[in-house]
Image (cartoon, rainbow, N blue to C red):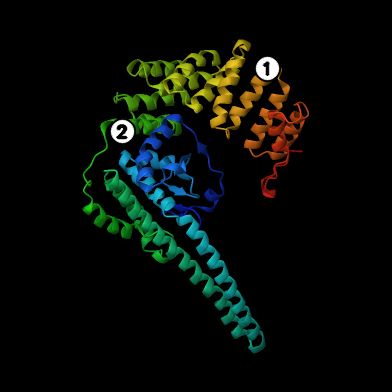
Amino acid sequence: MASIGALALAVQPVAAQQAKRTPNIIRDAEIENLLRDYMRPIYRVAGLTQQNIEVVLIGDKSFNAFVADGKRIFVNIGALMQSETPNEIIGVLAHETGHIAGGHLARMRQQLESAQTAAIVAMILAAGGVAAGAAGGANMGGAAAGAVLGPQEAIRRTLLAYQRGEEQAADRAAVTYLAATKQSPMGMMRTFERFQNDQIFISQRISPYVLSHPMARERVAALEDLVAKSPYKDAKDSPQLQARHDMMRAKLYGFSEPPDSVARRYPLSNMSLPARYARAISAYRYGSIPDAIRQIDGLIAEQPDNPYFYEIKGQALLEAGRAREAVPPLRRAAQLSNGHPLIRMLLGQALVAAGDKASLDEAIRELNFSLQRENTAPAGWRYLAMAYGQKGDIPNADLASAQAAFMSGDFQLARELAGRARLKFPLGSPGWLKADDIVNFKPPAQAIRKKPQ
């Protein structure tokens, strides 16, 4: 279930320990490109084309998606893995788009401000009751304590009811977007039916009025009416889109599941491209690199213009300590992907790790290009620092190391490194200005990390 201030599609309560975990953000060129293709028509009909909304992948296998601001939709890899068709996940993301287009987060903040005011008034009134109780006896005090709890519970239920209304509005918006793009709402319907089945075991014990989302059975009933009226109810995803979806799911299973689970889902008897993709990734992650490379080469032979097969080959070789061998397939992947920054960043890392001084300028060029577009990647900054260090360019090496520390949240180390770099750059130069910005950055007090003693 979403907490107040973050609107989500999932209905299961989040365990306290899970909520405290730092989310594991997943970056992948293939998956991100596919999700952009899924969402481009939805953003257009929602009037959000100019918003540059980003879909962020979270490495969690539960089925969930949510928005926490007007710029990003967060989706668990579990939602992608469990969605059997593109239409299912597109419906989920269309729902979240409805929250953004509807301005629900901004209005929720207004509701919270009103609720805080109401809570203060309730507490003042209750405090008066407590004072009266002190004069009139213990029973009055007990009644006053109930008066404190009563208004707060009523306020909480009012907020949850408001959020349930926003969820229903996002459902309706999603169906509208799907119709406008000539897509079926049936995938979204199947998702809610899944939620309905998951809720059977709790529905008898939880009041629907204390849930921030409508009970799944109510949402399914409401959606049934909308689905029945859609002229595109029976529309199917294109075979090309379904094929890309199947490859995405295979990739996620290959990376995130243990080998025995991959083998059960994609047995050797299954010679489809997604099955071979999943097994090749699993082999590189958990098995023999020579066997994995043999399997990946088989994929390349079947689709020689697929950049992501070359990317996987390069990544497998790089992580196996064979950086020199990783460079050619990563160069090919960068070329075929029209210079995707994540792939060029991986190429830059391989060039640095190869230890070939003749390739340092190319490595610096690739990493700088990538970091101009993906500047929050600490690993990219670290490899850039290594490249500058191998060239003997210490000021830029210190500055890149400061950026790596900054993006990792180690602001104290970032300031120290940036201060050292600032001393070595000419006053007012671009490097000096970047270092000075880091030195003078004021992070939130709770974000400052202390160096280990």
Residue 235 at what x, y percent from top left? 23, 42
Q: Nearer the viewer, residue 60 or 386?
A: 386
Viewer-proximal residue, 12 or 445? 445
The local secondary structure at tag 2 comes to helix
Q: Residue at x 50, y 67 (%)?
A: 156
Q: Which mark is residue 241?
A: 2
Q: Report if the CB atoms under discs 1 and 2 are less than 8 Å apart.
A: no
Side of 273 where 101 appears, left or right:
right
Q: CA distance from mark 1 to mark 2?
A: 44 Å
Quick one: 401 or 320, which is closer to the camera?
401
* Residue farthest along the right direction in this orientation: 423
Image quadrant occupied by the N terminus: bottom left
In this picture, is 139 found above or below 248?
below
The C terminus: image quadrant: top right
Depicted 110 relative to depicted 129: above or below: above
- When the figure is inspected, residue 247 is found, relative to residue 46, above or below; the finding is above
Which residue is drawn at the image coordinates 39% and 62% (left, top)? 165
Circle nearer the N terminus (1, 2) = 2
**Residue 128, image x and y in percent?**
63, 81
Can see residue 31? Answer: yes
Tell me the element at label 1: helix
The amino acid beneath tag 1 is Gln
Q: Residue 45, how many percent across, how many down?
A: 35, 46
Q: Position of residue 75 (x, y in %)?
A: 44, 43
Q: 224 or 139, which is in the foreground?
A: 224
Where is residue 133, by image quadrant?
Answer: bottom right
Q: Amino acid at mark 2?
A: Leu
